[in-house]
Image (tube, rainbow, N blue to C red):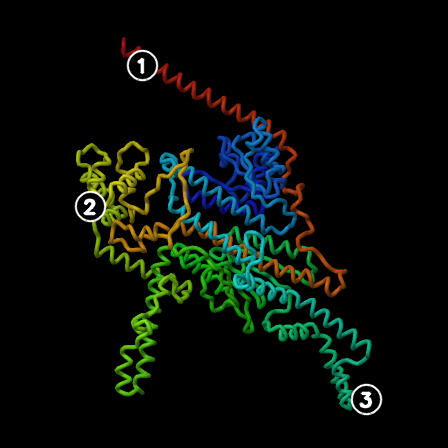
Amino acid sequence: TGCEVSLWVAEQFVSDLQKSFPYLFIRAVSSNKVLGLFGQELVMPCTGFPYSQKTMEIKNSPIVMIISHSGGTFGPLACSNLLQSFSSSIFAVSSEWDTQVGKQLRSMYSDDLLSSRIFSTGVGVRPAEPCSVSVVATHQLLTNIFEHICVSIISEPMFRHVSGAIITELDLQILERCNQENIRALEEIVCVDKKGGELHEKRCRTEQELRSAGDLWADHILEVPKAYIMSFIYVMVTVTSGWPLISGLATASGLRSSHWTFYIVRFLDACLYFWLPQINITILRLIQGRNLRHRMVGRTVVIGDCPWVSQCADAFLSKIFACSYSIAGLNVLSANPADHLVHRHTHRVVRGSLLVCGRPDGRLPALTSLEASTCLSVNQASSIQSIGGTCESITIGHNKSKLPLSKHAIYLKSHRPLFLSEKVLDDIDAHEDLVRQRQAKKSEENAVIRGRTFYERAASFFPLKKDGSNSFLELSLSRSRKAKTARSSASLLGAYVDLEKQARKKRSETADVFRAVETMIKDRQGIENARRLFKEIDSDGNGVIEVEEFIAAYQKKDPNLSEEHLHRLFAEADIDDDGMLQFDEFVKVSQMPNLVGELSVKNRDSRGLTQVQASKERYFGEELRKHSLNPGVSSLAMSQSQYFSMELYESRIASMQRFVAMTVMFHQMGMRVQTFFPKISFGYWGYRMDRTHSIMRIASTASPVSGADVRERIEELRLMLKIESSVALIARTWRKYSMEKRGQVTSASEGK
């Protein structure tokens, strides 16, 4: 639970956790809703949301995580008191150990000062209203908490079974590698290293592009006050001197004021006064090289990205301009481009609207369709034209491909290894580049050979270097890992669909026992076919597969399989650790496209937790591809086991990089506007963009829900819970007594 940006970051955390463990009941609920339902004498209904005292199961001692960076926001602070009547497992995420929320939670563990249940981001007090560092720090800390929760659950087979764990150790290894490499990516976005020093100019290219985009949009906003100043100077000079521009030129050219044509001159001067602001804006745009077709009104910025990024960036930008002068004001909107951006905002698109949209990394097949939807939304918004003009759109993402209708595309370096699917497609693109290179070289040589003598032609077939190597045959393969081809979202989507079709066709042509089992499981008759294979492996016919039968069956298929690998595979599938595989557990094994890839390394610490190390592969899936036990399975089919890793990379790593990039751009934009007014007023006019009129970030934050009844409600709720527990205990005891009594009566009647 939390409020505003803390809640939005928490919602993404809950989404990732729920996907990883679908059997768990995990919810992210606003602190105001919790207070409205349980902290009021008269319950405040949550209209439009499926929350009520009946639907929210918080009476069975749930695990509660309160997220409040300041630690003093009213809603979370009141919830830290209120929820103590429901649960003793309450944790908090805040900026420091010593906060108001931390004080409330430490009072629950007065006997042990260190058992505070406080997770600290360590960034300290951030008094600025626009949230940037605090949001990123909270998101990063939640990523670390997410990894620890996953490790704790997947370390125990029973926990994995009960929670329906989807995430694997390989997923966590990939996430941890991306998490570590994320530091380098963030350094280049902000142009500051992790120690606080400035980076070399060559590594600041991304930051420079972001600040240039911020300067451009700042010029859009400042054109109105600049045109106002230019108009003021013109009016003051011409009226005071009595010489308007056109009249002065006419008089200087010899035209007498008594002549009738002088009335036309005065009419033109009147028109010049009337349209003077528009004329000055046009002059500014010509000088600065900006679009002339934009409307000459206040600007609107639309932010498109995944929910937590778009909402947090919206809050950041709107607060930066909260205290700006109305002549340089800004309207900020946000939406999810893969969902409702088109429906909510494209009908508002006018010439001069400013759209910034974060693009997911569509080079990953799990995100290709998501990027295609995002690009389609941007294209739809940018295709709405009036008088040849449309909105000005900028995309921020990791794919180098630029949309044809966008103004600019800012590329963020990934600083991570390629995934297996990327490697497959990259090899294909590199091969095509190599073929084109050879064809171009051959065409050039043929053109040169035509003009040579016979001797020169003969010598040209053996062009040797100094070391004796043949330069024609030794074409560079250095691009085989990173081809120059930059595919668009549509091209990526088509390429992956074609590869999937080819892989499906190949699977149908070269199906073996294992792939046949995988295919049949998906069909209506699949379970029966899998059961038939299960009976074949179960040589003693006792209804379960023992480890010796399992190893014998798989080694019969492939004698090269080591017993160590098969033992680990058996232990991974044996959920209940009884030393035998039931039919349901066998089905899980048969569905694995690559047996080695699904194994978990049982590397545990003294607490019994699996120790997950960051992946050290040159590209994710290298070991999966190298140790494939089933040659018929294509690399693309193997990469499907990485789809969840790709989703986690998008939600935990890539989305954070896009948010940081947006804050850099918006900060430059706001700083330019903030420093403009003191310059033109000799320091008299000015404002601070780190403040708003409401001062929302102080400890006594206002809340739409009153907390006056919380103290009384705490005692009342505790009493109600005790009564309910007592009633439940009495009911269980009575049922047990009734069943025993009924059994005694039945025995007595049978005895008679």
**Nearest the eye: 449 or 315:** 449
Using the image, determine if residue 539 lies above or below residue 245: above
- Secondary structure category for the residue under label 3: loop
Across and down, in percent, residue 192 comes to: 56, 56
Tag 3 residue: 258
Q: Give the spatial CA distance, label 2 vs label 1.
A: 62 Å
Left or right position of 676 against 354? right
Mark 2 to mark 3: distance in Å? Answer: 112 Å
Work out which quarter of the rendered image holds the C terminus and state it. Answer: top left
Disc 3 to disc 1, how far (Cα)?
128 Å
Whichever of callouts 3 and 1 sits on the residue coming sooner in the sequence is 3
Q: Amino acid at mark 3?
A: Ser
Q: Amino acid at mark 2?
A: Pro
Q: Are marks 3 and 1 in contact (CB under 8 Å)?
A: no
Neighbor class of circle 2 (other Cα within 10 Å; few <14, some 14-19, many 20+) is few
Residue 525: give its label: none
| Sequence-first tag of 2 and 3 | 3
- Front position among marks 3 and 1: 3
The amino acid type, in three-letter code, at marker 1 is Thr
Residue identified by numbered label 2: 559
Q: Residues within 10 Å of mark 3 (few under 14, many from 20)?
A: few
Residue drawn at x 31%, y 33% is 577
Q: Residues within 10 Å of mark 1 (few under 14, many from 20)?
A: few
SS assignment at label 1: helix
Place of residue 146 in the rendered image (x, y in percent of width and height, measured from the top left)? 47, 43
Task: Tell me the residue at 53%/58% (across/down).
Answer: 189
The quarter of the displayed image where residue 688 is located? bottom right
Instruction: Mark 2 vs mark 3: give the one in front.
Output: 2
Q: Determine whether label 2 and label 1 are within 8 Å by CB.
A: no
Per the image, the residue denoted by label 1 is 746
